[in-house]
Amino acid sequence: TQTRQTTRAVELGGVTIPAGAAALVSSASRDESRFADPDRFDINRNEGNHAAFGFGHHFCSGRFFAREQMCLAVRLLLQRFPDLSLVPGKEPVFRGWEFRAPTTLHVSLGVRHQ
């Protein structure tokens, strides 16, 4: 969880945040003025940079290692189950603000749904 503290009162999205208030950066990648349908999971989303791993000198040093681990895991999963697909009508519901993840993930391992 990345937090910042305001040094002076600022207005953000029509809301005044007072000086000394703590703000969470976790919602930065879900800014509806920047991302279309920000609460919908879309693995093919290509709307520019996001703040999932921080930025500047607060950038996550483990990001590149984590990306390689994830690419390997997904590649092996798709090699083993080439017809892996989401089950229609059971779309994932995401919860959480610090560790955001689906509460359940219903998939079919063999039959591709149209």
Image: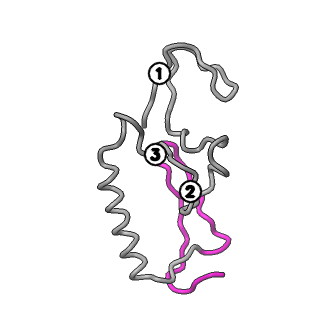
Image quarter (top left, top right, bottom left or bottom right) of the N terminus: top left
Depth order, front residue of 88/13: 13
- The answer to whether residue 3 is above or below residue 69 is above
Which residues are the magenta region? 87-114
Depth order, front residue of 37/90: 37
Secondary structure character of the magenta stretch overall: loop
Question: At numbered mark 1, what does the secondary structure look like: helix, strand or loop?
Answer: strand
Q: Which residue does the numbered mark 2 point to in the structure image?
A: 46
Question: At numbered mark 3, what does the secondary structure look like: helix, strand or loop?
Answer: loop
Q: How is the image coloured?
A: one colour
Q: Position of residue 88 (x, y in %)?
A: 65, 74
Image quarter (top left, top right, bottom left or bottom right) of the C terminus: bottom right
User: Which amino acid type is shown beneath numbered disc 1?
Assistant: Gln
Residue at 32 percent of width and 53 percent of height: 64
Q: Position of residue 75 (x, y in %)?
A: 38, 73
Q: Position of residue 109 (x, y in %)?
A: 49, 81
Residue at 62 percent of width and 81 percent of height: 113
- The answer to whether residue 107 is above or below residue 102 is below
Residue at 62 percent of width and 65 percent of height: 91
Which of label 2 and label 3 is nearer to you? 2
Q: Position of residue 108 (x, y in %)?
A: 54, 79
Residue 5 bears which disc, if any? 1
Q: Is residue 30 left or right of residue 67?
A: right
Q: Quadrant of residue 3?
A: top left
Crowding near pointer 2: few (<14 within 10 Å), some, many (20+)?
few
Q: Which residue does the numbered mark 3 point to in the structure image?
A: 52
Query: Which badge, 1 or 2, comes first in the chain's sequence?
Result: 1
User: Which amino acid type is shown beneath numbered disc 3?
Assistant: Ala
Which of label 1 and label 2 is nearer to you? 2
Query: Which badge, 3 or 1, comes first in the chain's sequence?
Result: 1
Q: Is residue 81 left or right of residue 61?
A: right
Residue at 63 percent of width and 21 percent of height: 11
